[in-house]
Image (cartoon, grey):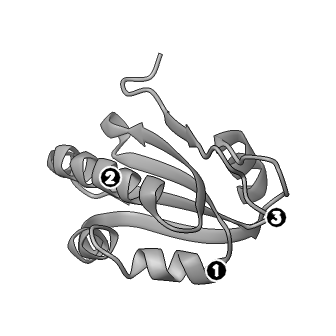
Amino acid sequence: MPLIPDLPWTAEDVGDGPGIVMVTHLHLRRFRDVPAFLRDSLAIRSQTMAAPGARSLYLRAQPLARHFTTVSWWDDQAVVVAFVRTDPHRAAMRRWGPEMREFSNRAYPGTEGVVPTLKTAAALSA
């Protein structure tokens, strides 16, 4: 059983078309930053759930490993760009960017009507 359970959110409406899936891996340098980073992550999760064009978000937090993974599904690239330029996401990325040991963010085409999961992300990232 993980220390923190995965936080899945499935949109009630999966939208039209395949959309775009974003897979993000974030690895912090210092263990002491984990509580504040997790707090920011939860604020961004709330932001995502209310964002126009957001279809679904899945968050896996592995605090002891200092690693966080998100899988998000959006209508298109334009709504992703609008989202990342809005606080609290924008402020968090400015704050945490220098504190990352590793960061990767990849976009993949979605599958119409299929909500992406961490398993989906693992297959896409392979």
Q: What is the secondary structure assignment of the residue under circle 3? A: loop
Q: Mark 1 is on which residue type? A: Gln
Image spot of residue 65 (x, y percent)? 37, 40
Q: Residue furthest front?
A: 13
Residue at figure coordinates x 40%, y 37% from the top left: 62
Residue 34 relative to residue 89: left or right: left
Looking at the image, is mark 2 or mark 3 nearer the viewer?
Answer: 3
Which residue lies under the disc numbered 2? 41
Q: What is the secondary structure assignment of the residue under circle 2? A: helix
- Tell me which label, 1 or 2, sits earlier in the chain: 2
Residue 11 relative to residue 69: left or right: right
In the rendered image, the vertical position of residue 73 relative to residue 79, given as above or below:
above
In the rendered image, the vertical position of residue 97 relative to residue 51, given as above or below:
below
Q: Which mark is residue 101?
A: none
- Tell me which label, 3 or 1, sits earlier in the chain: 3
Determine contact: label 3, label 1, CB under 8 Å: no
Q: Depth check: 68 or 78 in front? A: 78
Image spot of residue 93 (x, y percent)? 31, 72
Mark 1 Cα-neighbour bin, 10 Å: few <14, some 14–19, many ≥20? some
Q: Which mark is residue 77?
A: 1
Residue at figure coordinates x 19%, y 43% from the top left: 35
Image spot of residue 118 (x, y percent)? 64, 43
Residue 79's image quarter?
Answer: bottom right
In the rendered image, the vertical position of residue 60 relative to residue 69, given as above or below:
above
Q: Mark 3 is on which residue type? A: Pro
Q: Residue furthest top?
A: 1
Residue at figure coordinates x 82%, y 64% from the top left: 18
